[in-house]
Image: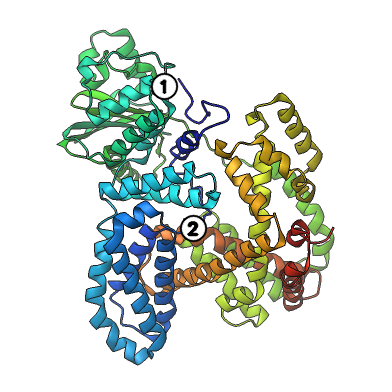
């Protein structure tokens, strides 16, 4: 069966790039800190419906959520902006007006002003929110995404943001991203076999009339025909029918062949597969949709491991935009309740599904097995050995640990480690607790002021270097995608020459030398192959010092948005304010990174005897010197990385 992620033409076309954008909808292309207008609108509506009385300390939170809405709205593509038109304009005008009131009024005046505004403001924001599930909004977002792929001058960041927003709107309409991804990728791959599936889903053909083609055949559609079919898929309303969904659970152990819990029934997949393949007296007990031999379902798609249990969820007749999600939630609820009463819940939901409508399988998502282990791997053990060697001479004078300051920092290290195993909402509180401790130890004022003073310049530099390094590194490790054998050999040799492996510490990468090969990377990777647009964006940013400074300034404009969003979410968590999980996820990595840096600086200062304050002063001075020297260096690579 054709792999949808492999370009079908070389050099790849813009439709190949669009097809790649339809794959793996849960993988975000934009930075983890990026929000979008759907999340920002939902967050603002939460603030407008908040039952707490307004007090002066709420003002930063209001300003932050309004700034997020205005900024995310400014990133919309032209099709979506035109489709939302009046509703979007009214929401932005409301945000501007409310921001002006907050900035220009005293706390006592706002306490009386806000209640008079909230009803009308809520109506405006609710009007915009009501647009997200609409078919024309999804289609407009799809057209913006397609245009970004078609536009050779579009920056990678523009494409990434539009792709993330498109999939968020698919979810807002309660459509299953996985099924939509498979259908769109099928059409854009021009696979005749999968095109039949898409047309069945659209209702263009009847399954009774289908003759399934060979899996590797081409449908012969033009680009325009593919795009027109994709637009119909994106905007299609679900059809009524009797829906049955099969999902799977791992770690369930051997079981009886069948157990019924209302509309949810659990089945032994080994037994099912054997009966379907061999027949016999048990065949009548198998649900009818699995016995349909005329479709594309085959018994070997069922998981065969002994530890797996299948769950069949009968949703009954109706119209369902995302039946797989709904059925999965029902099955997981039954498993969770059973696990709660048993006292332990070990069953783990696997990827994959079967969807049957009116007794026939219409959609198959491959059942995957996710294997995990709590045992540390070899590289982790090596890293521990190296780190113990590094710490030994420095800790010698501190052991046994009786120093209260060092004990406090070690406690904070434990918090930071615990936070890495927590979901975003819980992790944010632990990370900010670390930041509060270090801010207090440096006498830098509140934690958010400490971040702005001590970490802003270093965050900007790290964001720029990691962005450039990530793109170049991906190019070198993607040598197999190069068309010419000599280019593949060049990339392999370059990767080996630039990479140093050290036991325990992993690999180090000579980014400065790698950037000398940037013109070769631009030549080797075509624009639409996924890496090509990214490496060209890096080339533009490093084309001149002015371009580098502009990139720095753009990131500097995002820093206060992120910092104030983190402050808003932390305060909402601590004081019962409105909060969205999706918004918390945008500051999760940001908070973890800054808390980790803060601990590292404090720990180094404590161990070497200089002290936490002196270590922070040195850390800040280095970052500030880098930032102040940006405009005085003539070479952009030297401006970014510093002198050799």
Q: Are marks 2 and 1 in contact (CB under 8 Å)?
A: no
Does residue 577 appear in the picture of this structure?
yes
Secondary element at tag 1: loop
Quadrant of the frame with the N terminus = top left
Q: Which residue is mark 2?
A: 34
- Of 398 and 318, the residue lying toward us: 318
- Does residue 520 appear to the left or right of 270 in the view shown? right
Q: Residue at x 50, y 64 (%)?
A: 428
The image shows residue 429 at horizontal and vertical percentages of 49, 67
Relative height, residue 504 to residue 17 (above, below): below
| Disc on res. 496 | none
The image shows residue 218 at horizontal and vertical percentages of 42, 19
Q: Residue at x 66, y 65 (%)?
A: 549
Instruction: Please rate how many residues cluster around mark 2, counting C-alpha atoms within 10 Å: few if below 14, some from 14 to 19, many from 20.
Output: some
The image shows residue 576 at horizontal and vertical percentages of 36, 72
- Does residue 191 appear to the left or right of 134 in the view shown? right
Relative height, residue 41 to residue 6 (above, below): below
| Disc on res. 304 | 1
* N-term-proximal mark, 2 vs 1: 2
Foreground disc of the pair 2, 1: 2
Q: Residue at x 51, y 47 (%)?
A: 29
Relative height, residue 3 to residue 502 (above, below): above
Mark pair 2, 1: CA separation: 40 Å
Does residue 505 appear in the picture of this structure?
no
Relative height, residue 152 to residue 212 (above, below): below
């Amino acid at each position: 069966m054709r792999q949808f992620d492999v370009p079908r033409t070389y050099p790849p076309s813009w439709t190949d790039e669009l097809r790649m954008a339809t794959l793996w909808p849960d993988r975000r292309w934009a930075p983890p800190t990026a929000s979008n207008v759907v999340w920002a609108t939902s967050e603002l509506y939460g603030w407008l419906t908040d039952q707490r009385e307004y007090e002066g300390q709420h003002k930063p939170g209001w300003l932050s959520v309004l700034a997020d809405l205005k900024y995310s709205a400014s990133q919309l593509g032209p099709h979506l902006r035109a489709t939302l038109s009046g509703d979007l304009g009214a929401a932005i005008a409301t945000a501007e007006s409310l921001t002006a009131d907050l900035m220009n009024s005293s706390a006592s005046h706002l306490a009386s002003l806000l209640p008079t505004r909230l009803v009308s403001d809520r109506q405006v924001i609710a009007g915009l929110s009501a647009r997200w599930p609409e078919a024309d909004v999804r289609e407009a977002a799809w057209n913006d995404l397609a245009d970004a792929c078609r536009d050779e001058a579009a920056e990678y960041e523009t494409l990434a943001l539009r792709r993330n927003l498109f999939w968020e709107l698919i979810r807002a309409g309660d459509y299953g991203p996985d099924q939509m991804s498979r259908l769109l990728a099928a059409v854009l791959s021009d696979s005749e076999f999968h095109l039949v599936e898409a047309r069945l889903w659209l209702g263009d053909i009847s399954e009774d009339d289908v003759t399934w083609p060979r899996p590797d055949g081409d449908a012969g559609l033009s680009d325009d025909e593919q795009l027109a079919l994709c637009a119909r898929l994106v905007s299609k309303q679900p059809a009524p029918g009797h829906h049955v969904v099969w999902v799977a659970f791992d770690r369930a152990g051997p079981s009886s062949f069948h157990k019924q819990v209302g509309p949810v029934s659990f089945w032994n997949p080994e037994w099912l597969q054997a009966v379907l393949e061999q027949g016999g007296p048990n065949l009548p007990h198998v649900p009818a949709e699995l016995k349909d031999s005329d479709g594309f379902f085959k018994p070997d798609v069922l998981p065969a491991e002994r530890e797996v249990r299948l769950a069949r969820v009968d949703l009954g007749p109706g119209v369902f935009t995302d039946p797989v999600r709904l059925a999965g939630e029902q099955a997981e609820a039954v498993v969770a309740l059973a696990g709660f009463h048993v006292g332990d819940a070990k069953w783990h939901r696997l990827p994959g599904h079967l969807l049957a409508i009116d007794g026939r399988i219409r959609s198959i998502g491959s059942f995957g097995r996710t294997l995990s282990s709590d045992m540390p791997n070899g590289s982790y053990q090596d890293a521990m050995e190296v780190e113990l060697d590094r710490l030994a001479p420095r800790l010698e004078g501190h052991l046994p640990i009786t120093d209260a300051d060092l004990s406090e920092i070690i406690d904070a290290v434990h918090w930071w480690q615990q936070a890495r195993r927590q979901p975003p909402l819980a992790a944010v509180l632990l990370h900010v607790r670390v930041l509060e401790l270090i801010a207090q130890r440096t006498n830098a004022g509140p934690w958010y002021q400490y971040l702005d003073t001590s970490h802003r310049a270093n965050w900007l530099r790290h964001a720029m270097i990691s962005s450039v390094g990530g793109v170049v590194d991906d190019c070198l490790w993607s040598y197999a995608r190069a068309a010419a054998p000599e280019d593949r050999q060049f990339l392999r040799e370059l990767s080996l020459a630039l990479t140093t492996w050290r036991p325990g510490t992993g690999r180090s990468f000579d980014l400065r030398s790698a950037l000398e090969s940037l013109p070769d990377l631009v030549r080797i990777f075509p624009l639409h192959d996924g890496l090509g647009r990214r490496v060209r964006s890096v080339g533009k940013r490093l084309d001149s010092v002015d371009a580098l400074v502009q990139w720095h300034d753009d990131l500097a404009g995002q820093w206060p948005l992120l910092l104030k969003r983190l402050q808003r979410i932390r305060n909402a968590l601590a004081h019962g304010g409105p909060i969205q999980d999706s918004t918390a996820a945008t500051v999760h990595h940001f908070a973890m990174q800054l808390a980790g840096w803060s601990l590292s600086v404090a720990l180094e200062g404590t161990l070497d005897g200089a002290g936490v304050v002196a270590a922070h002063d040195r850390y800040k001075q280095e970052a500030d010197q880098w930032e102040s020297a940006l405009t005085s260096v003539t070479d952009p690579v030297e401006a970014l990385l510093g002198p050799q």
